[in-house]
Amino acid sequence: MELGADCFEQKLPMLEELILASDFLGLDIEFTGLRSIYPKGQQTSLFDSPAEWYLKTRRSIQQFTVCQIGLSMFSNMGRKSNKYLAHSYNFFLFPTTLGIMDSEFSFQASSILFLNQYGFDYNKFLKNGIPYMNEEQEKKIKQDLLTGNWKVRSTLDKDQMKVVIDEVTRWLEMAQEGDWMTLPDITGFQAFEVQLVLRQALPTVWTLMKDKGVLVKKVSRQYRWCLENSSRDHDDCRREKILLSARGFAVFFQMLVKAKKPLVGHNMMMDLLHLHEKFYRPLPESYEQFKLNIHGLFPVLIDTKNVTKEIWKELSFPRASNLLEVYEVLNSDLNPTKNSCPVIIHASECIKYVETKYPHEAAYDAFLCGSVLLKVAHLLLHRSTGGVRLEPTFPQYLGVLAPYVNQVNLIRACISKINFSGPDSPSSRPPTLILKVKRWPGVDEEQIYYEFKDLCKFDVRRFTRNQFLLMTNKFKDVRIVLQEYRYHPDLQVMLYRYWRHSPNINCILQICGVVTTWAFLAFILGGSPSHVQ
């Protein structure tokens, strides 16, 4: 089911009920871009520590925005039933533009073409996107509303507001107390702003929001004071209602945080960064603080990319390059537990997913994440019990998934996953290679990269004047390069060994060697006179 700004607030109570009744939530997010084009030497690489990777990626998160969030809420249909009901929703989002808030974000051409290929509806994103803000932005809006210091930022809105004020001012000159006028076709946040500005500028008017626009009534100053100080339950311009509308999806985000349900994604690191930045708080500079914040928001994270990557080879499953392929392998006869897996039923509002695939539609991918989780958990439980047939509960599934909980896949860094509930594990990447170059003056990292590019891809970093470090995420690439360049006359490749190749260690060894030599000479020379006597 698709939700936009026109119906989001009305659906919130029902969505909250679904969240609270669910066992876990599948999540997927689509963005206006993924990776910024950084200056040379500042791109993420396999040499980056997690903290370095985080600081580089943080800039990208601040540059792009979220255009669609998919959430699939899975709930077990009975204590003794291995059936799950999935409610899947697409939320189209667009940043709040209210008062002085006017977000800037970029579109990356490759991301736009990618989403176009899969039928993404940009009209719904741009025209009917649910607004959102983080806690810092909310504080600013609250302060402006509380102090009455309301300003309209965009030039277009300022021009429109001037026209409205001129029109109402001319009408007031002729109107009698109690007369009404209508400002048609003013809706959404613009209707809030028009009312706030009119009430601030003109002390003898009162405003109401109606389906066809904003109604303006001429009142006395005394009656205006009474309206402002009487019951505000039905005042469309009261602070609480404006904030609720302006917060938009952030209200729903807080429902997710409060529920503390397990959150399931696939390669979900970028999703978590955007959730923090767009709906919680601006990303901190500290990588460790980011980890603590995310763990506090979502104590149970499961990344199906990490889970399947860990077990795929030992199960002898064919390589799957994306989420849909993983799902199809688990649904095929290659999965020995295919016939005993949990039955997953789509809720009535999501029946379009029953027969048709919608890859990279956020709600469909969120559904795939949850389905993959259940099928993989069932397979692991089946193996741990020796194939005994049973009707497992979701807590039992969580039990066998315990080694993978809060371990989120990381694509381009020196480690392959981040642990959100403790210290990160040591690197499991292939060993680093060191390349010594002869007879190639002025060679740089880019030239070295293209030297190996046709054979296999390495990240390259200069080590010394004529030495370079090479890193890859494939063990076979290490073997291939060591074999192919074994007898190369100008390029000598070997495994990097810290104690052998580190300049710091070499420097210490040289100093120790000099000191030892001088000590030995002093001992010999100092002891020679005694031999003469």
Image (cartoon, helix red, strand yellow):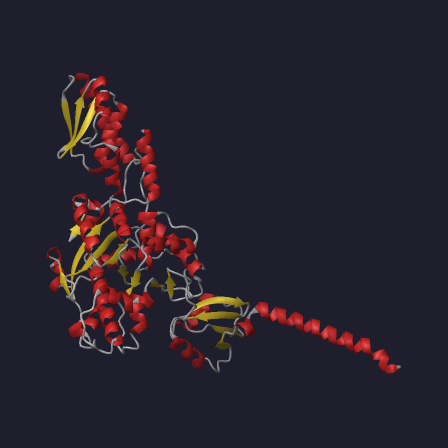
On screen, residue 61 above or below 487: above
Q: Residue furthest right?
A: 533
Quarter of the rendering containing residue 248: top left
Question: Which sits in the foreground, 279 or 76?
Answer: 76
Question: Which sits in the foreground, 170 or 293?
Answer: 293
Q: Position of residue 481 (x, y in %)?
A: 43, 78
Residue 492 shows in the view: yes
User: What residue is shown at x 28% (from left), y 37% (from top)?
Assistant: 98
Q: Position of residue 284 (x, y in %)?
A: 41, 50
Residue 149 shows in the view: no
Quarter of the rendering containing residue 314: bottom left
The C terminus - image quarter:
bottom right
Q: Position of residue 17 (x, y in %)?
A: 18, 50
Quarter of the rendering containing residue 75: bottom left
Question: Which sits in the foreground, 518 or 401?
Answer: 401
User: What residue is shown at x 18% (from left), y 70% (from top)?
Assistant: 391
On screen, residue 128 above or below 516: above
